[in-house]
Image (cartoon, rainbow, N blue to C red):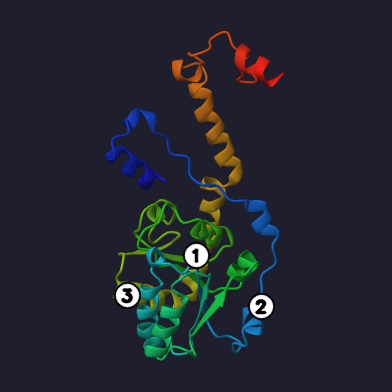
Amino acid sequence: SDAIRQILINDGMQTAKTTVVHEGIDIDHIASTKPLDLHREFSIPPDTPIVGNVAALVSHKGQRYLLDAIALVIREVPDARFLIVGTGHLETSLMEQIQRLNLRHHVTLTGFRPDVISLIKGLDLFVMSSVMEGLGTSVLDAMACGCPVIGTCAGGIPESIVNEETGLLVPVQDADALATAIVRLLQDRSLRLNFGRAGLARAKSHFSSIRMVRETTGVYETLVDTVHARDTAYPDADVQNHISPTSRDDKE
């Protein structure tokens, strides 16, 4: 992401030696994956809105702020249910927070799931609550699933979500703002559908794995004839095998 590029530049890397190639996802695979009936899977009453978060249970993913937001959301949308998908060392503390906020009937920590794409396709809304993030591949997955997305302004997330077009962006570590965004979308089905369609279109045009490979290849093509691409230590060596005559003899 450009956010990572800026970190590298701030750490002293020359700007001219940096190029951004955004992560790519398998659009066709996601399109062919069938959605999971989450109401049946998790014994949730029919027509109940379901919000999901997919991330490791670690501090920089910000689930503690999501739980604080959920406590506010259920005041406005009391039937909402939330699935937090993933594993990590904060599982116990998050469970304690759920108990403390009396959210045990609203939040499920699913643990590891091998069917994440199917699960995302069953959601009404996807939320990324990160404090720090490179780009946020789960956000890209959700967009490719046609799921409306709310994300924080952490790292590269604003490079994937176009605010008020493919989803909503909120400040980092701001439970109030996150809750407001969740309530807004849960109460506006038409807006959710519009964001979902726009997000899918953006995922196809900007974040496909085919595009990623093409752009990565393009970076190598711009460097292939530069001095740093040639073997200056052994200019006459067998470049194909990267083995000097001496090392070849040793191997034989």
Residue 72 image-quadrant placement: bottom left
Q: Secondary structure at mark 2?
A: loop
Taking the image as shown, residue 167 lies to the left or right of residue 12, namely right
* Of the pair 123 and 184, the residue shown nearer to us: 123
Do the CB atoms of the residues marked 1 and 2 lie less than 8 Å apart? no
Amino acid under disc 2: Asp
Give percent across and percent down for residue 95: 45, 83
Q: Earlier in the sequence, mark 1 or mark 3?
A: 3
Residue name at image x 32 percent, y 75 percent: 175
* Of the pair 41 and 94, the residue shown nearer to us: 94
How far apart are the alpha carbons under marks 1 and 2?
Answer: 22 Å
State which mark lies toward you, 1 or 2.
2
Q: Is residue 231 something one can see in this rendering?
A: yes
The residue that disc 1 covers is 194
Give percent across and percent down for residue 148: 49, 66
As displayed, is residue 214 above or below residue 246? below
Amino acid under disc 1: Asn
Do the CB atoms of the residues marked 1 and 3 lie less than 8 Å apart? no
Q: Secondary structure at mark 3?
A: helix
Residue 172 image-quadrant placement: bottom left
How far apart are the alpha carbons under marks 2 and 3?
Answer: 29 Å
The residue that disc 2 covers is 37
As displayed, is residue 165 above or below residue 66? above
Amino acid under disc 3: Ala
Give percent across and percent down for residue 163: 38, 59
Q: Residue 220, labelled with which disc?
A: none
State which mark lies toward you, 1 or 3.
3
* Of the pair 19 and 80, the residue shown nearer to us: 19
Give percent across and percent down for residue 25: 58, 51
Q: Residue 175, labelled with which disc?
A: 3
